[in-house]
Image (cartoon, rainbow, N blue to C red):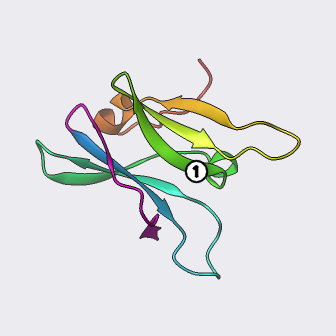
C-alpha cells in the first residue's frame, strides 16, 4: 500500500490518519486507513469493510470527527460517513450496525 498523492494526514484527538491505496496493479482495490497515535507513538489500522473501502476518496475532519467521502457514480451520489475513532484506541472495528 502507499499514501494517496497530495492528500495530507487528518489530525483528530491526538491521532494522525492517512488513506492508503493499493501499491500495484496486481493488488486488490481495497484502501485502508492508517492511524498514528502521537501520545503512544504507535501505528494502527482503522477497519473498513472491503465493500466500502474500494470507494473511499478522502478523509476529513468535521467538527473533531473523522469522516470519509465515498465515490459516487452516475447512479448514486457521493456519500459521507463518520468513522468512530474511539475504535482505534480500543482496537475494535468502528463499522457495524448500531
Mark 1 falls on what kind of element? strand
- Give percent across and percent down for residue 61: 39, 33
In reply to whether residue 3 is colored magenta, the answer given is yes
Q: Is residue 22 above or below residue 59?
A: below
The residue sitting at 12% across, 45% down in the picture is 40
Question: In percent of the image, x 31 and y 51: which residue is there?
Answer: 44
Residue drawn at point x = 64 percent, y = 81 percent: 25
On the image, the x and y values in percent for residue 16 come to: 27, 46
Magenta stretch: dominant SS? loop
Q: Give the labeled residue for mark 1.
A: 57
> Does residue 45 lie above or below 28 as drawn?
above
Q: Please tell me which residue lies in front, 43 or 17.
A: 17
Residue in front for this viewpoint, 70 or 74: 74
Q: 42 left or right of 44?
A: left
Q: Check the image and report above or below for 21 versus 52.
A: below
Residue 64 is a magenta residue: no
Q: Position of residue 63 (x, y in %)?
A: 37, 21
Give the extent of the magenta segment.
1-14
Residue 3 percent across, percent down from the top left: 42, 66
Viewer-closest of 81 and 8? 8
- Say which quadrant the C terminus sits in: top right
Q: Seen in the image, is 65 located left or right of residue 47?
A: left
Q: Number of marks in the image?
A: 1
Amino acid at each position: 500500500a502507499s499514501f494517496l498523492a497530495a492528500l495530507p494526514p487528518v489530525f483528530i484527538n491526538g491521532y494522525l490518519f492517512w488513506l492508503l491505496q493499493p501499491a500495484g496493479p496486481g493488488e486488490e482495490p481495497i484502501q485502508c486507513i492508517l492511524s498514528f497515535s502521537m501520545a503512544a507513538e504507535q501505528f494502527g489500522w482503522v477497519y473498513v469493510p472491503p465493500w466500502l473501502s474500494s470507494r473511499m476518496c478522502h478523509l476529513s475532519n468535521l467538527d473533531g470527527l473523522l469522516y470519509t467521502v465515498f465515490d459516487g457514480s452516475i447512479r448514486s451520489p457521493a456519500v459521507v460517513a463518520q468513522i468512530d475513532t474511539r475504535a482505534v484506541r480500543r482496537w475494535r472495528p468502528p463499522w457495524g450496525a448500531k
